[in-house]
């Protein structure tokens, strides 16, 4: 009994209830910073210490290997049986591997099957596409893999997929899926999607095997339940025994991964599936100030699809949320950097300051500003702007136009878009150039003239050189940023990104649009290229502290003393494309994302929006995000005469198109704008 008291000593009333009520189904709705991991770990240790089950009779599922290891370490500190580990504690995938190694034959595999990674999948899909005469330039392996993964997450093997007769693209992908699935079976292999799907098929088709595990697992515990997809939830439900001792912990208000297949309805419908379900709400926050929590709670209360909880803290009231308005994105980056440099550096380590953006291309203006004033920064979950592949490709085109001796730039653009020129040809060209002491461009020209290249290669390289010479002439009569538009169009680079069905290409196109906007800040091509060279060669590895730059998605689970949330404008946040594709469902997820952003802050939070932002290379008036209007007026300290009714003038319930200039010039916005200008 003493060990139990010690175990429960550091828990509040609600946390204790969630730990002690071990029998029957339970859902722990744990708000941000409310100690959900502590509850899950303590519940696990309590079950073992009270001898309700042996460690190997508990199934505990996490979403990452890191979380599994941390939980395993914590539990071992708490339990009396020091030599025992919880053998069924791990991710969905790692536990599925254990099931399948034991019962591989039941699903047509051998127990030493191989698990394919993404690169293995891509290589296999490429081979299949080649054999089936499918143009991999138009439909990429990544896109096909994404479709296959989506089907597997819905529980569909090839024979179970149903598609519309008119959807030729899905028909084509399904034909590849059939060949792919047969091929990996022949290889005695499976991919990550198979691991969970095969377990579900195993338990559905072999009830005797399923019964072994249902009897063994006296308790099931699940972390981050709001992030489960259809097949993961089915996997869990198949393993629950008649006593229904399943406890799922998570936060419906932090469900922000629907684009990965996560289904919030798993969380919201849990009590409908398990009728005797007990719901425990963890609402006491141990991370943030009262004001931050009140702001976040008021915002998320506008969502209708939620369990419903309100965070509170026994800590300090804390600073008001700072709401700032800037003229444009550049001024926003300058304003935020000034606050960091002149105010926050005195109070916090830079490591405890973060800028959280909705879209990754937003980081560029902050990176430029930090480079200029010498503040260290890191990009978490992403690549620095000028190091992104598509940006380097575009800059390489500009470099070779600027001067013909830039062999590295020319070598890079020969391969994008692909022109059927491989490494052996490049080596041949360099070898010729070294012998004759000439640059790569002249080497290509001489070898074309002397007919030393194969016809197809000769034609491709001739076309490229002709385009480069044309662009050099264009550079004398066009602005440098207009020149890049011409280059991206005529080279086929833009078409390559638009035509190639790849889920990452939308971000690549956005980054190129941001690059075009960045070029407008420089007088000519030479000065821009000098800037890029200095930006990429600058010593980014400052010793000591760095400001954290990342998307809000990447920040989930993290916390910082001070958080900046720039770009709170309609069309950017909430994101217009999300709203167009998924309507009210997407709006609620965008609001959950805003909630996640605000609750990353422990002490201070800054929200900002701009009056004008560049979209697709054009300047457009911007509207403040509807989320700003949902924040209580008493929680906010406004700057630049920002009044709460600036967003009340706009009717967000109307069907508005934020890609149209006319919409921005409505009378309501004209009145709104006057209030913002000093």
Image: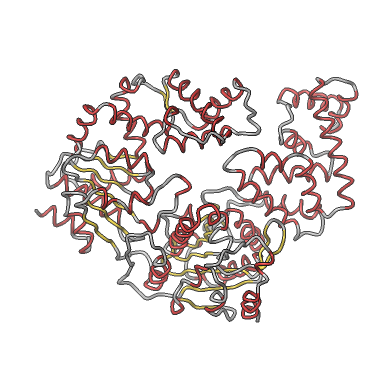
Q: Quadrant of the C terminus?
A: bottom right
Residue nearest the observer in this picture, 459 or 25? 25
Residue found at x 63% / y 67%: 622
Residue found at x 27% / y 61%: 281
Colour scheme in use: secondary structure
- Which quadrant of the view contains residue 331? bottom right
Please tell me how many numbered marks the rendered image carries. 0
In the rendered view, would you say 366 is above or below 476?
A: below
User: On the picture, is 21 further left or further right than 431?
Assistant: left
Residue 278 in sight in this render: yes
Residue found at x 61% / y 70%: 335
Residue 486 in percent (x, y) is at 80, 47
- Residue at the extreme front of the image, as rendered: 165
- Which quadrant of the view contains residue 295? bottom left
Residue 83 in sight in this render: no
- Which quadrant of the view contains residue 86? top left
Residue nearest the observer in this picture, 11 or 437? 11
Residue nearest the observer in this picture, 285 or 178? 178
Residue 64 in percent (x, y) is at 38, 43
Residue 390 in percent (x, y) is at 67, 44
Residue 288 in percent (x, y) is at 38, 67
User: On the picture, is 199 further left or further right than 53?
Assistant: right
């Amino acid at each position: 009994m003493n060990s139990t008291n010690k175990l429960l000593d550091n828990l509040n009333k609600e946390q204790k209830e969630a730990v002690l009520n071990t029998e029957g189904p339970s859902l722990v709705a744990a708000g941000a910073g409310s100690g959900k991991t502590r509850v899950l770990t303590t519940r696990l240790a309590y079950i073992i210490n009270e001898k309700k089950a042996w460690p190997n009779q508990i199934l505990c599922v996490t979403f990452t290997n890191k979380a599994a290891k941390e939980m395993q370490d914590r539990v071992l500190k708490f339990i009396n049986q020091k030599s025992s580990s919880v053998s069924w504690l791990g991710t969905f995938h790692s536990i599925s591997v254990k099931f399948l190694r034991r019962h591989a034959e039941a699903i047509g595999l051998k127990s030493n099957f191989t698990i394919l990674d993404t690169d293995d999948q891509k290589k296999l899909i490429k081979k299949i596409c080649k054999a089936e005469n499918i143009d991999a330039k138009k439909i990429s392996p990544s896109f096909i893999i994404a479709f296959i993964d989506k089907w597997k997450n819905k529980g569909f093997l090839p024979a179970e997929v149903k598609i519309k007769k008119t959807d030729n693209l899905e028909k084509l992908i399904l034909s590849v899926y059939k060949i792919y699935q047969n091929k990996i079976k022949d290889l005695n292999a499976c991919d990550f999607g198979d691991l969970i799907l095969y377990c579900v098929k195993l338990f559905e088709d072999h009830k005797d095997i399923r019964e072994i595990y249902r009897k063994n697992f006296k308790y099931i515990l699940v972390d981050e339940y709001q992030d489960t997809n259809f097949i993961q939830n089915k996997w869990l439900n198949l393993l629950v025994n008649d006593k229904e001792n399943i406890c799922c912990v998570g936060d419906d208000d932090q469900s922000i991964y629907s684009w990965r297949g996560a289904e919030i309805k798993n969380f919201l419908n849990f009590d409908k599936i398990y009728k005797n379900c007990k719901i425990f709400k963890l609402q006491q926050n141990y991370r943030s100030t009262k004001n931050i929590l009140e702001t976040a709670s008021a915002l998320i209360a506008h969502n209708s699809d939620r369990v419903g909880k309100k965070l509170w803290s026994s800590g300090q009231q804390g600073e008001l949320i700072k709401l700032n308005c800037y003229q444009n994105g550049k001024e926003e980056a300058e304003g935020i950097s000034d606050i960091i440099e002149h105010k926050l550096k005195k109070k916090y380590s830079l490591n405890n300051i973060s800028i959280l953006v909705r879209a990754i291309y937003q980081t560029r203006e902050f990176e430029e500003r930090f480079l200029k004033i010498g503040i260290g920064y890191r990009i978490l979950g992403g690549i620095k702007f000028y190091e992104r592949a598509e940006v380097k490709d575009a800059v390489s085109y500009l470099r070779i136009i600027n001067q013909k001796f830039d062999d590295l730039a020319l070598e890079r653009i020969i391969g994008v878009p692909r022109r059927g020129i491989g490494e052996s040809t490049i080596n041949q060209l360099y070898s010729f150039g070294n012998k004759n002491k000439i640059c790569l461009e002249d080497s290509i020209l001489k070898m074309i003239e002397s007919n030393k290249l194969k016809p197809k290669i000769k034609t491709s390289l001739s076309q490229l050189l002709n385009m480069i010479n044309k662009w050099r002439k264009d550079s004398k009569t066009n602005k440098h940023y207009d020149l890049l538009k011409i280059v991206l169009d005529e080279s086929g680079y833009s078409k390559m990104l638009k035509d190639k069905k790849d889920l990452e290409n939308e971000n690549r196109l956005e980054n190129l649009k941001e690059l075009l906007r960045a070029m407008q800040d420089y007088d000519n091509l030479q000065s821009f290229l000098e800037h890029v060279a200095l930006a990429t060669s600058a010593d980014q590895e400052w010793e000591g502290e760095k400001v954290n730059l990342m998307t809000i998605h990447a920040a989930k689970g993290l916390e910082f003393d001070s958080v900046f949330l720039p770009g709170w404008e309609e069309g950017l946040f909430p994101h217009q494309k999300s709203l167009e594709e998924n309507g009210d469902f997407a709006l609620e997820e965008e609001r959950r994302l805003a909630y996640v952003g605000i609750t990353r802050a422990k002490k201070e939070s800054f929200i900002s929006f701009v009056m004008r932002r560049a979209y697709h290379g054009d300047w457009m008036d911007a509207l403040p995000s509807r989320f700003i209007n949902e924040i209580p007026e008493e929680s906010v300290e406004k700057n630049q005469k920002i009044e709460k009714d600036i967003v009340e003038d706009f009717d967000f319930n109307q069907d508005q198109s934020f890609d149209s200039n006319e919409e921005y010039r409505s009378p309501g916005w004209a009145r709104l704008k006057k209030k913002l200008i000093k």
